[in-house]
Amino acid sequence: MNAASQTILEAFNALPEIEKHALASEIIKTVTLMDYPQLTDDALTEIADNLFVMHDETEGNDAETQPR
């Protein structure tokens, strides 16, 4: 992510929750209208692998914070 994108993200995070939801909704509407290239099987596999790693990390963090 470049500096301009980081600045936008920081500004977004500073918004009140209701404004975050409104802006996110508008961004999603805009993004869904964009023309994207077809994803290859390799790209989809990489995305899935990354999601599983993120999920595993989240589960590990959740297990550490759960009382026994």
Image (spheres, rainbow, N blue to C red):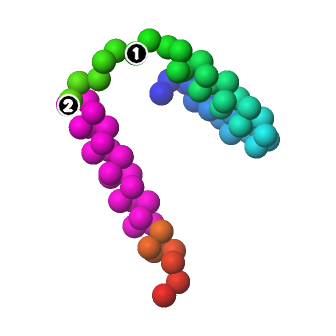
Residue at 36% across, 46% down: 51
* Cα distance in 3D space between marks 2 and 1: 16 Å
Where residue 64 sits in the image (x, y, percent)? 45, 74
Relative to 51, say whether 22 is above or below: above
User: Please, what is the dominant secondary structure of the magenta stretch?
Assistant: helix
> Does the magenta-highlighted stretch encompass residue 46?
yes
Where residue 34 sits in the image (x, y, percent)? 49, 14
5 horizontally vs 12: left or right: left
Where residue 67 sits in the image (x, y, percent)? 53, 83
Q: Mark 1 packing: few (<14 Cα in 10 Å), some, or many (20+)?
A: few
**What's drawn in magenta, residue-wise?**
42-61
Q: Secondary structure at mark 2?
A: helix
Front position in the image: 13 or 21: 21
Relative to 41, say whether 64 is above or below: below
Front position in the image: 10 or 26: 26
Could you tell me if residue 7 is visible in this image? no
Q: Residue furthest bottom?
A: 68
Q: Which residue is mark 2?
A: 42
Residue 3 falls in image quadrant: top right
Q: Residue flagged by tag 2: what amino acid is it?
A: Asp
Residue at 54% across, 20% down: 31
> Does the magenta-highlighted stretch encompass residue 41?
no
30 horizontally vs 48: left or right: right
Per the rendering, the mark at residue 36 is 1
Could you tell me if residue 56 is visible in this image? yes
Where residue 22 sits in the image (x, y, percent)? 74, 32
Q: Residue flagged by tag 1: what amino acid is it?
A: Tyr
Q: Secondary structure at mark 1?
A: loop
Label 2 with label 1: CB-CB less than 8 Å? no
